[in-house]
Image: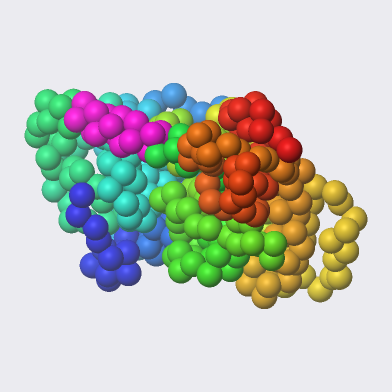
């Protein structure tokens, strides 16, 4: 997959946004989100068209008069891309493009384009390409041939549209190979996780896109993960260790940001990223407290976590307090905390809460292990050994392990 610079002037699309107002309570919020997505993809928004309707036209989405208005706007203002805030059927895209003299993409294709730009790891790129191909495959039927020859831009990054138009067998074969490669990587990751989970405290940082998850990870672990005030700034799973004052530690994993109506293709493609939340011991649910839609976005995130089966304990982390003129008492809510990942406000208390959570699940054992049974210590990590002394009757060891450790019964045999 060839990466392109989204700030390359040759790649910037002149965009017209289109929305259908069906009297949804969150319609204008969704349109604002579409604007942010378009800007994140590198588009130049030069107009917006909204039609209020009782229902969507099954053939053209909009009425003929509104489509004619769009076509006139396209010609007058040099628009080369129209983005609909709906997910379009293949026939609808073909019908609209026959009436509007430029490319047409939908919300999902826009999000996939951003993913194509931002994926960095080999697995992330494979997942993006698989999602693009699976979504685009039925939508290439009936596409105008001249449109497939357009230069790069939003909606064209990834597998290459000309190739897709001319060789559909390539699509099917490529999807099969991508799925096989992703499955292999998933199995390898599962093996690594099984070895890691045995001895590690796992914390998943989840939340709506642009809530400040990567900035939080960077600040807590002194990492250098890409973090910008943009939607989907981070797409690949990143894990770093945070060390507490007591010397104990936990692994923190950043995850792809959630978004309303996250397309099924994307959830499936990035299942491996979201799985980090499923296998976590603790979830930090990060939200932008300065966002007027903060509570709504928390609900979107919680619903998504339920869908993927993530049932670990959650701590609600209200980030970006530096943007508000308000004092916060972090002691008020037991499972919530107000922070600013940017300024550091509340981070010491957050680390304390994380450490306390894992301390509650730990048990300390004082053992005397005969030397002929010494091999049992290989079943825990050195970080779980609090003290160690060799004496005549064996090794006197104090260990601190999770109560759910599968070897705890074996260790209990040697309790002093």
Residue 32 in the image: state x and y as whole percent.
58, 54
Q: Is residue 163 above or below residue 212?
A: above
Residue found farthest to the left:
166
Residue found farthest to the front:
392
Residue 301 in the image: state x and y as whole percent.
63, 41
For residue 113, say whether it is visible.
no
Side of 66 where 302 appears, left or right: right
For residue 183, say whether it is visible.
yes
For the image shown, how many numbered marks are present on the structure? 0
Residue 96 in the image: state x and y as whole percent.
34, 37
Q: Is residue 406 above or below residue 396?
A: above
* Magenta region includes residue 189: yes
Which corner quadrant of the image does residue 259 belong to?
top right
Residue shown at 50% from the left, 57% from the top? 240
Residue shown at 64% from the left, 67% from the top? 341
Q: Is residue 378 above or below residue 239?
A: above
* Magenta region includes residue 400: no
Side of 221 where 182 appears, left or right: left
Residue shown at 27% from the left, 71% from the top? 9
Q: Is residue 356 above or below residue 178?
A: below
Q: Main secondary structure of the magenta part?
A: helix
Residue 251 in the image: state x and y as whole percent.
55, 52
Residue shown at 63% from the left, 42% from the top? 393
Which residue range is magenta in the image? 175-191
Q: How is the image coloured?
A: rainbow
Which corner quadrant of the image does residue 191 belong to?
top left
Of residues 26 and 355, which is closer to you in this image? Answer: 355
Query: Looking at the rendering, in which quadrant would you find the C terminus?
Result: top right
């Amino acid at each position: 997959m060839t990466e392109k610079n989204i700030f390359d002037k040759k790649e910037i699309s002149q965009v017209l946004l289109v929305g259908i107002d069906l009297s949804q309570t969150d319609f204008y919020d969704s349109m604002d989100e579409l604007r942010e997505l378009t800007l994140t993809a590198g588009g130049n928004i030069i107009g917006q068209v909204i039609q209020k309707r009782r229902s969507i036209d099954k053939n053209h989405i909009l009425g003929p008069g509104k489509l004619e208005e769009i076509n006139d706007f396209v010609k007058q203002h040099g628009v080369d891309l129209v983005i609909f805030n709906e997910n379009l059927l293949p026939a609808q895209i073909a019908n609209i493009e026959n009436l509007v003299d430029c490319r047409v993409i939908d919300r999902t294709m826009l999000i996939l384009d951003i993913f194509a730009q931002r994926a960095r790891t080999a697995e992330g790129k494979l997942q993006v390409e698989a999602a693009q191909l699976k979504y685009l495959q039925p939508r290439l039927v009936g596409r105008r041939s001249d449109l497939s020859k357009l230069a790069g831009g939003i909606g064209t990054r990834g597998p290459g549209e000309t190739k897709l138009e001319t060789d559909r067998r390539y699509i099917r074969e490529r999807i099969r190979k991508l799925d096989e490669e992703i499955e292999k990587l998933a199995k390898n990751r599962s093996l690594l996780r099984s070895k890691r989970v045995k001895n590690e405290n796992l914390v998943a940082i989840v939340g709506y896109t642009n809530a400040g998850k990567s900035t939080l990870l960077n600040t807590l672990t002194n990492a250098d993960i890409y973090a910008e005030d943009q939607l989907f700034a981070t797409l690949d799973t990143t894990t770093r260790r945070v060390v507490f004052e007591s010397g104990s530690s936990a692994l923190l994993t950043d995850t792809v940001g959630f978004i309303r109506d996250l397309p099924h293709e994307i959830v499936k493609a990035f299942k491996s990223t979201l799985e980090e939340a499923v296998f976590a011991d603790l979830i930090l649910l990060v939200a932008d407290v300065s966002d007027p839609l903060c509570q709504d976005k928390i609900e979107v995130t919680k619903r998504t976590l339920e869908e993927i089966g993530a049932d670990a304990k959650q701590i609600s982390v209200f980030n970006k307090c530096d943007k508000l003129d308000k004092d916060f008492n972090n002691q008020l809510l037991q499972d919530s905390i107000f922070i600013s990942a940017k300024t550091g406000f509340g981070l010491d208390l957050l680390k304390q809460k994380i450490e306390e959570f894992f301390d509650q699940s730990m048990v300390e054992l004082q053992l005397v292990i005969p030397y002929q049974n010494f091999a049992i210590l290989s079943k825990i990590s050195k970080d779980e050994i609090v003290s160690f002394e060799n004496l005549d009757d064996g090794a006197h060891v104090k260990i601190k392990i999770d109560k759910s450790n599968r070897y705890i019964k074996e260790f209990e045999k040697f309790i002093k």
